[in-house]
Amino acid sequence: MSISLQPNILFHQAVSHRDSSGSVTRRIMKRRSEGAHDREPKRFQVPRACDRCKSLRRGCSESRPCRRCIKAGLGDECVSSSLAANHPSPSTLPFGEWEEAVRKVREFTDDAEALESCIDRFFDILHATVPVVSEQYVEHLRSEAAATSSLASSSSLEAKCILAALSAQVILQAEDAGETVNSSMRSEAGASYGKTLFGNVLSAFRTLPPSSSPSFHQCLLIFFIYSCHMRVSQHVQAFIFLREATTTMSVMRLGKTEVRWKPLADNLFWALLISERSHAIRYSRPI
């Protein structure tokens, strides 16, 4: 009798063991799913917090003025010292790098043939879609760049950087299309010439002192640097300069823009607005 009941006993034990192990597994899976739902989403970190939020050790937003400063009624005091960090003084750069970069930028802008070729090419292929400069403005830049030979003049160096950045964008655009801008630019093969010129512009740009009252010159230079970063597929750096350009433009529009350049400033504003939104959509960036 005991032998005949033994299989049933073994069967019931196996079933109870299976049921208990199954219930344990279900409980573990339930806890894991509940934990996944209860877990808070990762907090979004802003790459550049304003000085007030930094000192308070509180979360900041990417807009300027940020939401916390606006709520506290301190929108006018919402500034970020990180702008100065992106514009280090020449002493913080490697020895001789900024002098060499400034010298290369000056040599390029002094080459009338190469510069004229790039300017003509810009108005031929880019001006229709990016009407941020005019022939009168370019002539003003050239006269301002040639006004003094001293490298200590920030206004002269800024004008040289704008002309060189515009030319770098044109060279990179032409090389993408398999074209040569000018025979004098064949000292370096392929896209390396445009990249080298852009690198020199970027190093020279970092020597310019930051300004609390941005000008149209400054906004335009940052915009061209953003465009060159996009040309060489450096999308992270491009987004940083794009946000800096839009912030600089927003601050500039609060002040007074020179009347003769106001139409160009308006065109640059819309170019930045469209670029920021298209970049955000394409690369899933915040607006």
Image (cartoon, rainbow, N blue to C red):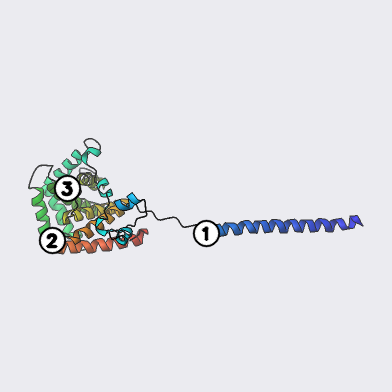
Disc nearest the viewer among 3 and 2: 2
Q: Which residue is mark 1?
A: 38
- Label 3 or label 1, whichever comes before in sequence order: 1
Quarter of the image for the N terminus: give it. bottom right
7 sits left or right of 122 in the view: right
- Callout 1 environment at 10 Å: few (<14), some (14 to 19), or many (20+)? few
- Foreground pick, 168 / 65: 65
Is residue 77 something that shows in the picture? yes
Q: Position of residue 134 (x, y in %)?
A: 13, 60
Q: CA distance from mark 3 to mark 1?
A: 65 Å
Q: CA distance from mark 2 to mark 1?
A: 55 Å
Assess whether mark 2 and mark 3 are in contact (beta carbons under 8 angstroms): no
Q: Which residue is mark 2?
A: 261
> SS of the residue at dot 1?
helix
Outermost residue to the front: 72
- Callout 3 environment at 10 Å: few (<14), some (14 to 19), or many (20+)? few
The kind of residue on which mark 3 rests is Ser
Q: CA distance from mark 3 to mark 2?
A: 33 Å
Assess whether mark 1 and mark 3 are in contact (beta carbons under 8 angstroms): no
- Label 2 or label 1, whichever comes before in sequence order: 1
> To which quarter of the image does residue 10 belong?
bottom right
Instruction: Tell me which residue sits at (14%, 44%) in the image.
Output: 106
How many numbered dots are placed on residues in this image? Answer: 3
Q: Which residue is mark 3?
A: 183
193 sits left or right of 135 in the view: right
Disc nearest the viewer among 2 and 1: 1
> SS of the residue at dot 2?
helix
